[in-house]
Image (cartoon, rainbow, N blue to C red):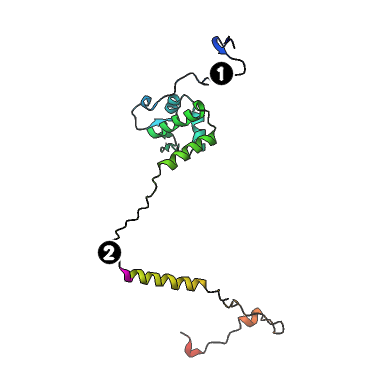
Amino acid sequence: MPERRATVAGATVSEFPGMAQHQPIRKTTPASGSDIPDKLYFRIGEVARLCDVPAYVLRFWESEFPQLKPHKGGTGQRLYRRRDVEMALRIKGLLYNEGYTIPGARQVFKAELKQKEPQLALTIDNATPNIDTRQLRKLQKDLRDLHALLSKPAARAAVHPIRTPRNPSSPRRTAEKLFDLQPIPENNKR
């Protein structure tokens, strides 16, 4: 099949019928970790320039990615640390260069986090030092007793009402009768 050439936006592009040309969306090379100045804190404008995105995009990414959390100073201004800038560059690379969606980029970070978490090794040594057989037998007995206790059917506990039930035939007390008290004798008054 002969190769055809076409000009798109002033550039010559090889064209094969039925095949799409895969070219990066952005022509600029992404900033790397070595391009970040050696500073303790960066303002949002500096980070926006380093990442080549508007500041509002960084603020949006903060709401979408929990890994990107800049410190807010006393004045409320965002102060990014170096690791925050590196995270913003990583997010930009995933979204703009690698073509991930925001949920897809979140999944990438989640998968990376799972890989970093160390898994506890289960080691069973054949030589077990200082095992007290009496303690093991006591523990075994306690576990059997607990199993027997939990295996018994639950006995229904008697439910005691908070108040005694009202008898419809008994007269109701009125407020006067409730507060009708006997007078205190004079010798008991203080």
Which is closer to the viewer, label 1 or label 2?
A: 2
Q: What is the span of residues highlighted in magenta in the rendered image?
A: 129-134
Q: What number of labels is visible?
A: 2
- The circle on residue 130 is 2
Residue lying at 53% horizontally and 34% vertically, measured from the top left? 102
User: Eyeballing the image, is 23 above or below 181?
Assistant: above
Q: Amino acid at mark 1?
A: Gln
- Whether 131 is among the magenta residues is yes
- On screen, residue 143 versus residue 126, left or right, reads right
Residue 189 seen in render: yes
| Residue 20 drawn at (x, y percent) | 58, 19
Residue lying at 47% horizontally and 70% vertically, measured from the top left? 147
- On screen, residue 126 versus residue 108, left or right, reads left
Quadrant position of the N terminus in the picture = top right
Residue lying at 36% horizontally and 72% vertically, measured from the top left? 138
Q: Dot 1, how many residues are within 10 Å of its Cα: few (below 14), some (14-19), or many (20+)?
A: few
| Residue 57 drawn at (x, y percent) | 51, 30
Q: CA distance from mark 1 to mark 2?
A: 70 Å
For residue 126, which quarter of the picture? bottom left
The residue that disc 1 covers is: 21
Q: Amino acid at mark 2?
A: Asn
